[in-house]
Image (spheres, helix red, strand yellow):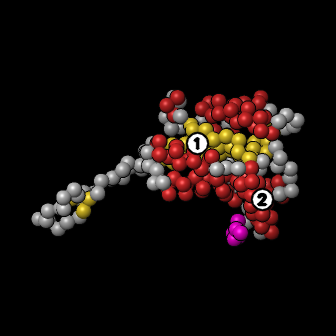
Amino acid sequence: MKERLVYAKAWVNADWSRVIIIDEKWFTEEKRGHACLELPRGHTPPKGLKRFKAVSKEAKTQLLKVMFLTAVCMGGPIGNYELDFSLHTKKQKVDSAFLKPFFKKIHTAALKHLGPGGAIYLMLDRASCHRSKFTVAWLATLGFTIVSQPPRSPDFNMLDAWLFPSMERTVNAKAAMTRDEIKAAVKATWKKVTMAECARAQARVLKNMRKSILLKGGNFYKEE
């Protein structure tokens, strides 16, 4: 709560015009099942259906991940990049070296969107791939100023409080299960991200910060 309070007080009235919020969002490919029916012993299943058999479910960590690195600011979308693990030596593991080219893409896109003329603040959570010495040094060479978000504070993050849930709703609504289906659903959501939506999401985050400040950094409040 103390970290949340300090963070909220520092940023609730700050200038967000050159602040980029980034984070990773992952989905899992699901294996489509077959229609099965549990029948009493000796009964024949209807045509086209199989007798039910118990099958052990793979753990989420064992399923193939479809992951995206997303960046937005209060002035609009910056970039949404699929993390292609086929190009990485450590399968399904996001580390500093893997993110390096994507941070470069975000920097290029941010400069194009914001223009030159001042520091660009990059808000990151405290995942090890974000706060490693390698990542910190690389982002410094690009000219980013890093801001660490407090733990357990999705209500202070535009992506967690707005865009990522929207992506999940689209994926679920389209019953997306395969990699291609998930990518299409995420792409459809990203195409609808506008400057106005980003501004509304930022206003919502600032409102959350004000409520949290009244609670001394607490997060037990009702969002409007």
Tell me the tag on residue 68.
1
Q: At x 77% / y 67%, what residue is drawn?
A: 211
Q: Is residue 140 visible?
A: no
**Badge 2: few (under 14), some or many (20 or more) residues near its Cα, within 10 Å?**
some
Q: Amino acid type of disc 2?
A: Ala
Looking at the rendered structure, the kind of residue marked 1 is Phe
Residue at (49% x, 31% y) in the render: 86
Residue found at the far left of this picture: 42
Q: Is residue 162 visible?
A: yes
Q: Which residues are magenta?
A: 219-224
Magenta region, mostly helix, strand or loop?
Answer: loop
Count of numbered circles in the view: 2
- Left of 176 or right of it: where is 7? right
* Helix, strand or loop status at disc 1: strand
Q: For the point 52% across and 43% down, which residue is it?
A: 183
Residue 185 pos. (x, y %): 53, 48
- The quarter of the picture where the C terminus appears is bottom right
Q: Position of residue 223 (x, y in %)?
A: 70, 68
Q: Measuring 78% from the left and 47% from the top, which residue is drawn there?
A: 75
Q: Residue 56: x percent and y percent?
A: 32, 53
Q: Nearer the viewer, residue 43 or 90?
A: 43
Q: Quadrant of residue 113?
A: top right
Q: Position of residue 71 (x, y in %)?
A: 68, 43
What's the CA distance linking mark 1 and mark 2? 24 Å
| Pick the front one: 190 or 61 | 190
Front residue of 192/144: it is 192
Q: Which residue is mark 2?
A: 203
Q: Secondary structure at mark 2?
A: helix
